[in-house]
Image: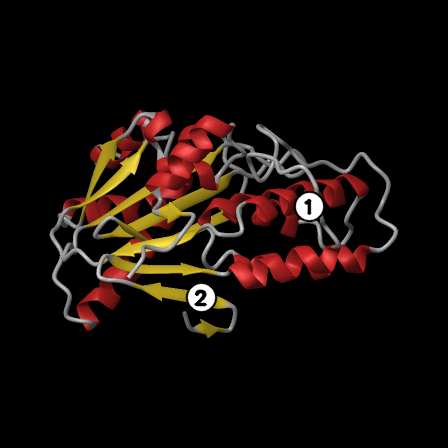
Amino acid sequence: MPNISGIEIARSQAGIFISQKKYLTDIVMDVGFTGSKVPSTPLPKNHKFDAVSAPLDDPEKYRRLVGRLLYLNMTRPDISYSVQQLSQFLCTPYETYWLAALHFLRYLRGTSSLGLFYSAKPNTSVEVYCDSDWAACPISRKSLSGYCVFLGGSLVSWKTKKQNTVSRSSCEAEYRSMGSAVCELQWVCYLLHDLQVQFPTPIPLWCDSQSALHITENPVFHERTKHLEIDCHIVRNKFKEGFINPVYVSTHLQLADVLTKSLGYPQFTTIIARLGMVSQPIPP
């Protein structure tokens, strides 16, 4: 199993498995975790960060830890939301943030063997899931966007990001998330074209907001939507070109949900399994 900058790769006839087990183990050992109880999720369900506790005495240890966790996110989409949350407070970390980081590390210690599996089956279909968490940040009230792109059923791109502006409704937040997902999808398809990989269109764009889907199909920009007209044009133009096919998916089947909020154990484990995360590589 070769090791390239902390990324471990295992190949078999079934596909490729990538992980960062040793890199993760080194992080846990440096912090000094041994024998700690392992939680079932990276953060407690519906956990929110705020600035109500005392500032951390040694902020450098928090910044150093979060910096290393950002690199770990390369093979661990299950921690994308948690890392995004922790990385917001590098300037002034508080005691509660450090405790949340320790909870996160205990989860990582118990799931160090998790990684992404990429199937060798000749499937080039593309699909994308997008979601948002409206007014997720209790400090700025900005929403979170999340999306995940699949190629042949394997996860190839994912992201959790706070939106640049405050959304005035959950529909607006969802539509901004759709706009970000479409831009990423376009970039992935440009790359596939360069590699001469053919894929069927329109590409399914799974969204759990009926109102956002209605805006996509409605050619009239009325008072409710003109303040997000740029995102409307991006999504609607790609819909009219036949590049994407926005489709409704129920919330409990929305895979991007794990990228925008802290979920409970049953839903969390179900989603990360569908993202293609397994605990051991396929034997050769």
Count residues near mark 1 (Cα–Cα under 10 Å), then give few for <14, some for 14-19, many for 20+: many
Going by the image, does 221 lie left or right of 108? left
Count residues near mark 2 (Cα–Cα under 10 Å), then give few for <14, some for 14-19, many for 20+: some
Q: Position of residue 22 (x, y in %)?
A: 55, 63
Q: Which residue is drawn at 85% across and 45% down?
A: 55
Q: Position of residue 245 (x, y in %)?
A: 18, 41
Going by the image, does 146 lie left or right of 42? left
Q: Is residue 221 above or below residue 126?
A: above
Identity, as a three-letter code, of the amino acid under mark 2: Glu
Identity, as a three-letter code, of the amino acid under mark 1: Ala
State the residue in front, 18 or 86.
Answer: 18
Q: Is residue 68 visible?
A: yes
Residue linked to disc 1: 101
Q: Position of residue 87 (x, y in %)?
A: 64, 52
State the residue in front, 108 or 275.
Answer: 108
Q: Which residue is drawn at 53% across and 44% down?
A: 81
Contact check, label 1 and label 2, Cβ < 8 Å: no
Going by the image, does 134 lie left or right of 66? left
N-term mark: 1 or 2: 2
Kindly report the distance in space between the C-alpha atoms of the residues bearing marks 1 and 2: 24 Å
Residue linked to disc 2: 8
Q: In the current view of this chain or complex, which residue is farthest to the front?
A: 283
Q: Residue at x 17, y 55 (%)?
A: 121
